[in-house]
Image (tube, rainbow, N blue to C red):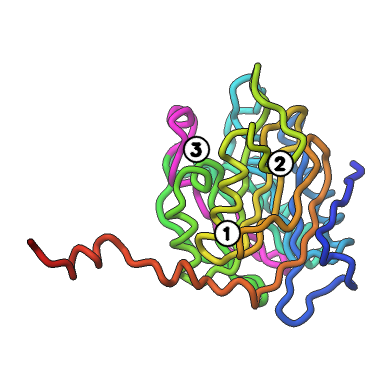
Amino acid sequence: MRLTKMRSELAGREAGTERGQIRIALANLAFPTTADDSVRRAEGAIAAAANEGADVVCFPECYVPGYRAPGRRVAAPEGAFLERAWSVIAAAAGRAKTAVVLGTERVADGQVLASALVIDKDGRALGFQDKVQLDPSEENIYAHGRGRRVFQVGALRFGVVICHEGWRYPETVRWLVRNGAHAVFHPQFHEAEAGGYRPTRFCDPANSFHEKAVLCRAAENTCYFASVNYASEGSPTTSAIARPDGTLQSFQPYGLEGLLIGDIDLTLATGLLAARYRSVESDAAGGSGL
């Protein structure tokens, strides 16, 4: 698998982390042909990200074994396969010295959850972030997860919100930033629908709200927001990195398989606007009657 590399305007510096800067990679990959293919593609993308000096690489939603979308043939959930796949990918992360945010599914108590497995640079699993807010169309496929957490790899503190959560529930991002995250990764699955709009430029006014939400999640919270989709023909959204001021840092050309590489400056991710949020509950408690 040959991956095309797209770089942000900061990515021409020497590979490696400078003071306050972290290099991230978004693996904008084609949908895997089989569950085993998803593992092979993930291994290849981790090695390619390491060659670009990435500190962390993030994959699309449920990339292992593949998102269970209508019309997509994905093998039945199998806990034993997933355990083997995670071990192989953790070993690849350890060899590459690159942390991984792996879009995956997991089986717990007989239920299938859409999730993300976070793996440190040494190949050690740091834990899962399950998808808590499901799209209504997913409720017969996946179970609701519970809880949210912030991970840390080196100087970078980050969280994960999965697809529908980041589009429709801005509270998920705000919680992470209020709890210390510099960046939020957003694994997603979004492919063309019959008769749907097919953009060629990011945030096209004629397109849906989704890519505008990428910029909003960053601006609302003074954090980086990094969204990663599958590479597919006619996709209505693509992988992109938004800066803490809500401007676009970079995006992957639509339908083009490859890595989107970007350097993020942690000193800009202050979380200022997230920290200034006054909850409805606190306002109500301090309010006065008429």
Q: Residue furthest bottom?
A: 19
Query: What percent of the width, then of the height, locates residue 284?
Result: 20, 63
The answer to whether one can see residue 80 in this image is: no
Give the amino acid at mark 1.
Answer: Ala
Q: Which residue is mark 2?
A: 238
Q: What separation in Å lies between label 1 and label 2 (alpha carbons)? A: 16 Å
Q: Quadrant of the rendered structure where residue 153 is?
A: bottom right
Residue 50 percent coordinates (x, y): 84, 62
Q: Is residue 100 visible?
A: yes
Name the residue beneath numbered marker 1: 218
Q: Are marks 3 and 1 in contact (CB under 8 Å)?
A: no
Element under disc 3: strand
Whether 138 is among the magenta residues is yes
Element type at mark 1: helix
**Mark 2 against mark 3, which lies toward the viewer?**
2
* First in sequence: mark 2 vs mark 3: 3
User: In the displayed structure, would residue 153 be above or below residue 41?
Assistant: below
Residue drawn at (83%, 62%) of the image: 9
**Residue drawn at the location 74% of the way across and 30% of the way down:** 34
Marks 3, 1: nearer the viewer: 1
- Disc 1 + disc 2, Cβ < 8 Å: no
- Amino acid carrying label 3: it is Val
Indicate the quadrant containing the N terminus: top left, top right, bottom left or bottom right: top right
As drawn, which residue projects farthest toward the top? 194
Give the label on residue 112, or none.
3
Quick one: SS at disc 2? Answer: loop
